[in-house]
Image: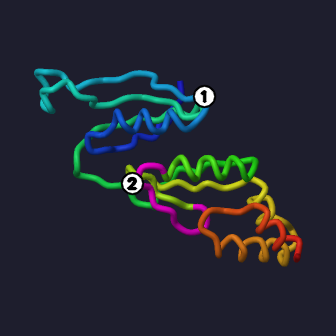
C-alpha cells in the first residue's frame, strides 16, 4: 500500500478522468470506485464519489467534489521521458480534447491539471558541472513550448 496518495478534485467528470489518464500511461488501471450512496448527503443518482487508480504504477485518487476548487500550475504532474518519441507521445496525448500548451515543456490538460513532460537527458545537461554547457542548454529550453531534446543537445554542445 502506498502511504501518500495524491487526491485530484474534479467537478463531476471523474469517470472521464479515469478513462483518459489510464488510457495514456502504461501499467495503469482503476483499483476501486466508491459511488454516492442513495441515502447520503450528495447526489442521489449513484454517480462516482471517489476512485483510486494507478498511472504507470503510481497511485492517485479522483474525487468528484464539485465546483468549489480548481487546479493551478502550483501543483503539477511530471512525466520523465527517456526519448523524444516519449516526449511527443505524452505531450500529444495529454493535450487531446482541449488541453493547452505552455512554455518549457508544461501543459494543462482538458481537466485543468498541469503537467511537465521532459526528457531525463535534458535534466542531466542542466546538472552538468560546466556552467557554460548547462547554461546554453537551459537558455535553449526556455525558448521552447514542447521540449525538443535534439535542439537542447546542440545548444549544450555549443553547436
The percent position of residue 101, horizontal first and vertical second, equals 51, 63
The percent position of residue 104, horizontal first and vertical second, equals 61, 67
Residue hosting label 2? 112
The percent position of residue 137, horizontal first and vertical second, equals 77, 71
Q: Secondary structure at mark 1?
A: loop
Res 17 quadrant in image: top left
User: Magenta includes 133?
Assistant: no
Q: From the viewer's perspective, is 138 left or right of 98?
A: right
Residue lying at 36% horizontally and 37% vertically, measured from the top left = 16
**Above or below 50: residue 143:** below
Residue lying at 45% horizontally and 25% vertically, measured from the top left = 30
Determine the CA span between mark 2 and mark 1.
Answer: 23 Å
Disc number for residue 150 = none
Q: Which residues are magenta?
A: 96-105
Q: From the viewer's perspective, is 123 left or right of 51?
A: right
Which numbered disc flags the more N-terminal residue, 2 or 1? Answer: 1
Q: From the viewer's perspective, is 50 left or right of 78?
A: left
Q: Main secondary structure of the magenta part?
A: loop
Residue hosting label 1? 27
Residue lying at 73% horizontally and 53% vertically, measured from the top left = 84
The percent position of residue 159, horizontal first and vertical second, equals 88, 76
For the residues bearing labels 2 and 1, Cβ distance under 8 angstroms: no
Q: Secondary structure at mark 2?
A: loop
Q: Nearer the viewer, residue 127 or 25?
A: 25
Res 142 quadrant in image: bottom right
Q: Nearer the viewer, residue 28 or 69?
A: 28
Q: Nearer the viewer, residue 96 or 16?
A: 96
Q: Nearer the viewer, residue 108 or 63?
A: 108
Amino acid at each position: 500500500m502506498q502511504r501518500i496518495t495524491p487526491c485530484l478534485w474534479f467537478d463531476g467528470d471523474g469517470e472521464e478522468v479515469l478513462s483518459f489518464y489510464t488510457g495514456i500511461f502504461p501499467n495503469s488501471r482503476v483499483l476501486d470506485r466508491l459511488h454516492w450512496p442513495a441515502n447520503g448527503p450528495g447526489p442521489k443518482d449513484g454517480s462516482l464519489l471517489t476512485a483510486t487508480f494507478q498511472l504507470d504504477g503510481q497511485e492517485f485518487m479522483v474525487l468528484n467534489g464539485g465546483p468549489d476548487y480548481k487546479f493551478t500550475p502550483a501543483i503539477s504532474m511530471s512525466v520523465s521521458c527517456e526519448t523524444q518519441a516519449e516526449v511527443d507521445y505524452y505531450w500529444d496525448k495529454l493535450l487531446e480534447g482541449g488541453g493547452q500548451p505552455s512554455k518549457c515543456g508544461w501543459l494543462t490538460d482538458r481537466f485543468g491539471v498541469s503537467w511537465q513532460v521532459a526528457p531525463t537527458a535534458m535534466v542531466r545537461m542542466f546538472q552538468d558541472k560546466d556552467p557554460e554547457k548547462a547554461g546554453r542548454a537551459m537558455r535553449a529550453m526556455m525558448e521552447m513550448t514542447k521540449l525538443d531534446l535534439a535542439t537542447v543537445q546542440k545548444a549544450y554542445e555549443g553547436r
